[in-house]
């Protein structure tokens, strides 16, 4: 029997990608024992309205810089090239193969809303969803347990947690800091900070 290739999928707007994203990606690869990780910046998302000045290719380039030299990480432009609203089910379909096992990483907020996503039944069939905590709000634990009970009953799988330190950090916060002239060098990879500065992003 041919060996199954374990592939992770980590999508997001990444505007910009920051250390929280990078740490989560590395923990995801390690804990799910992934052979490859696809980091996929979205074109447009159903959940978020992009800033008028948003440039998907800047976000793609920053992801490439953030994971430069990381073995097994593939930064993909598939959703940007597809154009329009990026639906996860379409991306999973394009990556699914009989010899692959797909894993998907999302944040807690998205983990709690998976059952509202387009093609949710197919999403659970095509991949094993996982989530990472990005906040320290322990009140969400009960909601996660309730959702996982529902997911198990309706789709036969739960959304497993990837263990990382809970970092209170968001891309919105970083954009605001750049706009206010604050230092972000400790919050994003060095090459990303330089790219933001050189291209005068988020001013």
Image (cartoon, rainbow, N blue to C red):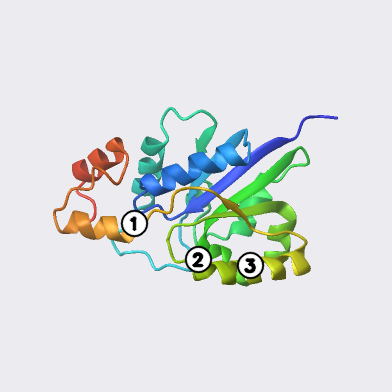
* Image location of residue 112, percent across then percent down: 57, 68
Q: Which mark is residue 109?
A: 2
Residue 76 in view (yes/no): no
Q: Earlier in the sequence, mark 3 or mark 2?
A: 2
Q: Which mark is residue 145?
A: 3
Q: Earlier in the sequence, mark 2 or mark 1?
A: 2
CA–CA distance in space, label 1 to label 3:
27 Å
From the viewer's side, name the closer residue of 42 and 150. Answer: 150
Position of the C terminus by quadrant: bottom left
Residue where numbered disc 1 is placed:
171
Left or right of 52 in this view: 21: right
* Image location of residue 76, percent across then percent down: 50, 42
Q: Earlier in the sequence, mark 1 or mark 3?
A: 3
Splitting the image into 4 quarters, where does residue 31 fall? top right
From the viewer's side, name the closer residue of 4 and 162. Answer: 162
Considering every residue shown, the one lying at the far left of the view is 181
Circles 3 and 2: CB atoms closer than 8 Å = no
Position of the N terminus by quadrant: top right
CA–CA distance in space, label 2 to label 1:
15 Å
Considering every residue shown, the one lying at the far front of the view is 138
SS state under label 1: helix
């Amino acid at each position: 029997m041919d060996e199954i290739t374990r592939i992770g999928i980590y999508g997001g707007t990444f505007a910009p990608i920051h250390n929280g994203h990078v740490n989560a990606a590395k923990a995801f690869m390690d804990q799910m024992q992934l052979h490859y990780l696809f980091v996929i910046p979205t074109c447009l998302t159903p959940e978020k309205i992009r800033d008028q000045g948003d440039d998907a290719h800047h976000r793609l380039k920053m992801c490439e810089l953030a994971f430069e030299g990381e073995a097994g990480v593939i930064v993909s432009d598939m959703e940007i090239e597809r154009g329009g609203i990026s639906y996860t089910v379409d991306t999973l379909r394009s990556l699914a193969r009989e010899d692959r096992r797909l894993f998907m990483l999302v944040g807690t907020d998205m983990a709690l809303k998976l059952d509202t996503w387009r093609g949710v039944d197919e999403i659970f069939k095509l991949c094993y969803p996982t989530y990472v905590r990005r906040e320290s709000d322990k009140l969400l634990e009960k909601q996660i347990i309730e959702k996982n009970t529902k997911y198990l009953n309706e789709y036969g799988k739960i959304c497993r947690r990837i263990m990382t330190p809970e970092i209170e950090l968001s891309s919105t916060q970083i954009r605001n800091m750049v706009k206010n002239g604050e230092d972000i060098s400790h919050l994003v990879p060095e090459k990303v900070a330089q790219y933001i500065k050189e291209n005068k992003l988020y001013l």
